Amino acid sequence: MSIFNGLNTSASALTAQRFRMDVVSANLANAQTTRATVNDAGEFEPYRRKMVVLQSDNQNFKSILQKATTAKNDTLSGVRVSRVVEDETPFKLEFNPTHPDADEAGYVRLPNVDPLKEMVDLMGATRSYEANVTSLNATKNMLMKALEIGK
């Protein structure tokens, strides 16, 4: 195990959480976007909420099992963004006959972005980011104290 494993793990988590905050920001910015994409019929569709899926750097069960069963303790690894998925919940309908994207009945399809959900997701990402900064600083302080032993 390298002495830098803790730093690498914290760095990967910081990168993943920053990306998660970027996706939340994009969701909030497009909360009122009614013309995000064009579907197969040539009609505009509202913006769909995006969500980040995180996974461990360990790729599969076999590699995890091999690392766990060997005497060498290299099982610590970081996290990475595996993919960004779209939320498939239906769009919100709002009655607004004066809107340029209103249908014949006067309803406008709005994005499926709930600002409350986004704020909860943002707070979770922020707390995780702060925890990883604390871990990074603790690891850095331990390494600095280890360097002072020889003085």
Image (cartoon, helix red, strand yellow):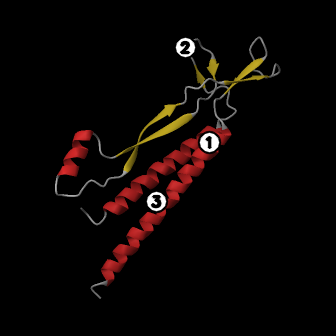
Q: How crowded is mark 1: few (under 14 residues within 10 Å), some or many (20 or more)?
A: some
Name the residue tied to disc 3: 132
Q: Alpha-carbon distance for marks 3 and 1?
A: 21 Å
The residue shown at (27%, 53%) is 75
Determine the secondary structure under disc 2.
loop
The spot of residue 120 in percent (x, y) is: 61, 46
Give the image quarter of residue 83.
top left
Q: Provide residue 144's location: percent of width, then percent of height.
A: 36, 77
Local crowd size for mark 2, using a 10 Å CA cut-off: few (<14), some (14–19), many (≥20): few
- The vertical placement of 12 against 134, above or below, is above
Q: In which quarter of the image is the N terminus?
A: bottom left
Q: Determine which quarter of the picture holds residue 53.
A: top left
First in sequence, mark 3 or 2: give its number: 2
Residue at the right extreme of this rendering: 98
Q: Which of marks 3 and 1 is nearer the N terminus?
A: 1
Q: Residue at x 78, y 12 (%)?
A: 105
Which residue corresponds to mark 2?
40
* Secondary structure found at label 3: helix
Could you say which is closer to the camera, residue 45 or residue 124? 124
- Residue under pointer 1: 118
In space, the residues marked 3 and 2 are separated at their CA atoms by: 43 Å
- 86 with respect to 108 (left or right): left
The amino acid beneath tag 2 is Asp
Instruction: Quote the CA–CA distance across marks 1 and 2.
Output: 29 Å
Which quadrant, please, contains the C terminus? bottom left
> Which of pointers 1 and 2 lies earlier in the amino acid sequence?
2
Q: Is mark 1 on a helix, strand or loop?
A: helix
Q: Which amino acid type is shown beneath numbered disc 1?
A: Glu
| Amino acid beneath label 3 | Asn
